[in-house]
Amino acid sequence: MEEKIAISPHKYLQFGSTQECNFYLVTEVDLVNAFAIEQENSYKSYQILTYAGGSLTEVIQQTQEPAHILVICPEHYICAVESEQLGLRKLAIMAVNSTPTSWAAIAHFLNVMEATDSEAQRAFANHFFDNIEQSEYLHIIDERYQTSAKFFHLADEYEWFEQGGFLDWGQQQIVPSGELSVLPLTHGKFSPECRLEINGELAFWGYPILHSGKDFSRRTEQAYIYEQLSTLKEHAVIATVENGAIAKLQATHPSVEAAKSALEHLFTIDPHYQLIWEVGFGINTALKLWPGNNAMNEVYGAEYGAIHWGFGLTTCTQYHLDIICPHSQVLSHTGEFLIGGNSGDTTNHQQDIVRNSAIACPCISY
């Protein structure tokens, strides 16, 4: 590496006030000299700590409270830290290990962190939840392909997560931040019998991300599958969805036959991939997509937010696949835009949604 990557702690606004706080960068031994921390005297102290695998909690406990901690470890699978172990600490973990991540990509997404408006994310999330709590279902459409599906999103067994806005003491966040998501859970655990009630047709047209779990030995296979799926950028594969499961796939253009085949291959080797495990909404409107298979693209919010569909869980499948579909629009049951356009003022909630602060990506870390 010819030039060190700048770490600018005072610009990462999700940490909040820096007064009397200590800043720590946690990275791998080989990367200590790859970063340069800009010390603007806004923090009490600055320090780099090393992580060589195992429990991240042990490294966290070396830090002096109050502390803001940024973790960048491309070669290690990072598990979330138990909240009670954090104390007066705020933890931000860069999503750099479920997909291969270049130095240029790390620098790019650090710039995204600097540009991220935490206040705007909080306002976006509040507005979004206010609206969907009043809607009987979410109507997902794609105008180009004339697809339409309904998602009955208010079931009690669904669990909603939000990853964005400001960190509080004892909290942790994947960065760059900016995702709202819902998953089907039974007593806090995944079960194939618990489905997201989605029916209709969806246009898979946009940007795939293929995450691996803890096993990094299959990077070649991961890259091959991603290349097949990447053809979705120009044209769509139409999915017929029945009770949250993919029943049929149809290519809209010869160029996406490879993507269709890749999806069908995943379905064949493990039927779990046919289930939509996650409906996610990227709300980071400061993020510019980075080319290729990159986990940090997941929070991409385009201009007004972007829906993505999640398949597979790395606790039971080799990969977790996200397909970002920025062209799709999400409407309320009355036809009001929720994602992809503006909506008017709303009142009188019909059903409250419990919002959980996500300490990691549920589809990768559960």
Image: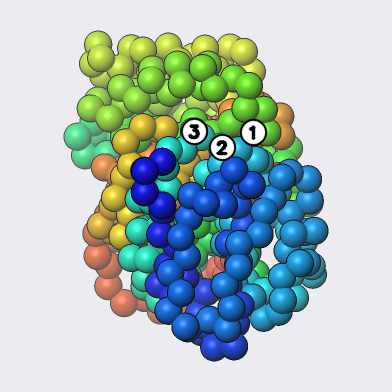
Q: Mark 3 points at which residue?
A: 100
For the N terminus, the image quarter is: top left
| Image quadrant in which you'd find residue 352 | bottom right
**Mark 1 or mark 3, whichever is nearer to me:** 3
Query: Circles 1 and 3: CB distance less than 8 Å?
Result: no
In the rendered structure, the answer to whether residue 82 lies left or right of residue 199 reads right
**Mark 3 or mark 2, whichever is nearer to me:** 3
Q: In the displayed structure, would residue 366 be above or below residue 283?
A: above
Crowd rating for badge 2 (residues with CA inside 10 Å; few <14, some 14–19, many 20+): many
**Cα distance between the residues tagged 3 and 2:** 7 Å
Q: Could you tell me residue 205's position as x and y percent?
A: 31, 32
User: Is residue 239 visible in this depiction of the protein?
Assistant: yes
| Image quadrant in which you'd find residue 57 | bottom right
Query: Circles 3 and 2: CB distance less than 8 Å?
Result: no
Callout 2: SS:
loop
In the rendered structure, the answer to whether residue 190 lies left or right of residue 326 reads right
Q: In the displayed structure, would residue 364 be above or below residue 250?
A: below
Which residue is located at x 31 percent, y 60 percent? 286
Q: Mark 2 points at which residue?
A: 98
Callout 3: SS:
loop
The three-letter code of the residue at mark 3 reads: Pro
Which residue is located at x 53 percent, y 81 percent? 43
For the C terminus, the image quarter is: top right
Q: Name the residue under label 1.
A: 213
**Cα distance between the residues tagged 2 and 1:** 6 Å
Q: Could you tell me residue 261's position as x and y percent?
A: 42, 11
